[in-house]
Amino acid sequence: MSERVIEPKSRGFLFLDSHPGGCAALVDEMWHAVPAPDRADDGDRPVALIIGSSAGYGLAATIAGLARAGIRGIGVCFEKAPGRRTGTAGWYRTAATARLARLHGQDMVFLNGDAFSDTMKEQVADLLTERFGGRLDHLVYSVAAPRRTDPDTGRVHASVLKPVGAPHTTKTLVFDESGAPEVKEVTTAPAEGDDVEQTVAVMGGTDWERWITFLADRSLLADGFTTAALSYIGSPLTAAIYRQGTIGAAKSHLEATARTLDERLAKTVGGRAVTSVNAAAVTQSSTAIPGIALYVGLLRGVLGDALVPPIGQLVSLWDQLTGASPLALDDEGRVRLDTWELDPAVQDAVAERWSAATSESVTALADLDWFGDEVRRLYGFSVPGVDYTAPVEADVPWPSHTA
């Protein structure tokens, strides 16, 4: 693909193309937002596996792990290569992350494929054995997917975003063709049939546990191994569609899996398994959830720059996983990185704005300029310092595995 000017063309919150230069600049911006480690590099860098390494909180986990915890290891993601259209944003972010890792002398391999498959698990296990001394210190699991093929049965499970028990009507934020914001009501039909079971099969803890079992059977888990699966609870304003809905059932299964794994790892390698409850953010996954766009815009309107971005949250998680700071757990054994969001005063202020939000008032109540920029940044647009009028090469290769 020859160089060309790439413009931000979208359908709703979904962009048709991604900007390679903007994605690279965003990764660089995130890397430089990470505080320098407060400990000396003794040369024995921890080996980590990040599953879901190219987007959202998984990308933040990868960059914070490299820049803060000094990790080396493997990132797994599923991205589309450049072709008739540009590559996916995650393709370009991965290339940029690999470049920065090399620049800082860190051996980070990125694999593109189905994280749910046993083929990928075999490939990761072989790399850990051959390239990283047969040792894995940390695993961060951050997978959001619409479907999963069960490796044992071949059955394809599909996740859905639905309330449980009854239809749910909520406010949601959309933008018309001219870009003007509209606050509308949308009603989502309740889960039916095996919707809950299928969503749990995709988004619950089954695959996370399968990864741990697979790697443990290959004797790859180091003494003191820690693993965290990233989760979300969220506001009462979004609970019916999220925490009390089908996705919430999957998150509850994820947390139950963490408790089972924690007991098992404590006995076998003196390790730990936790869920990390992260706070709200604009991600490609979250913008698909009814009401979340409006909620996050209002949250930013209340908090301004006090809203903690994913990279800041994941710095805290890595400090806890590596022992740089104590592992702080709630009564359910979860790391809570969302306390600033769920502070009662913050939630009361957001709820007041939520009630008052209309198409006419939302611009004054929510930070829509920030929200719009955050959505565009997911695809490499609205990143400071990038000349979007200049032609750019979209045919960026996947990072080489060569050491």
Image (cartoon, helix red, strand yellow):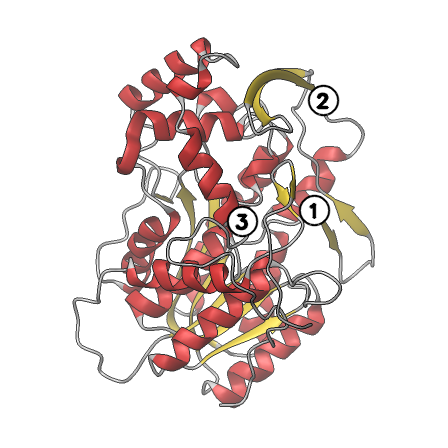
Query: Which percent across, then down, holds residue 217?
Result: 58, 74
Residues at marks 3 and 1, CA–CA distance in whole angstroms: 20 Å
* Residue, far front: 389
Q: Along the horizontal axis of the image, is 181 left or right of 48? A: right
Residue that badge 2 annotates: 190
The structure residue drawn at horizontal position 70% and vertical position 41%, both measured from the top left corner, is: 159
Nearer the camera: disc 2 or disc 3: 2
Q: Residue at x 51, y 42 (%)?
A: 375
Q: Quadrant of residue 180?
A: top right
Q: Earlier in the sequence, mark 2 or mark 3?
A: 2
At label 2, which amino acid type do we have?
Answer: Pro
Query: What is the distance, in whole Å, between disc 2 and disc 3 at their CAs?
Result: 26 Å
Say what secondary structure mark 3 lies in.
Answer: helix
Instruction: Identify the residue at the far top of this view.
Output: 356
Q: Residues within 10 Å of mark 3 (few under 14, many from 20)?
A: many
> Is tag 2's residue or tag 1's residue first in the polypeptide sequence?
1
Q: Residues within 10 Å of mark 1 (few under 14, many from 20)?
A: some
* 3 or 1: mark nearer the eye: 1
Residue 344 horizontal side relative to residue 216, left or right: left
> Residue at left 32%, top 17%?
349
Asked which secondary structure carries label 2, the reply is loop
Q: Find disc 3 in the rendering and name its residue.
A: 257
The mark that comes first in sequence, 3 or 1, is 1
Q: Is residue 106 among what the camera can see?
A: no
Residue 289 appears at what percent x and percent y? 59, 32
The spot of residue 125 in percent (x, y) is 58, 78
Rendered image: mark on residue 6: none
Q: Which residue is mark 1?
A: 146
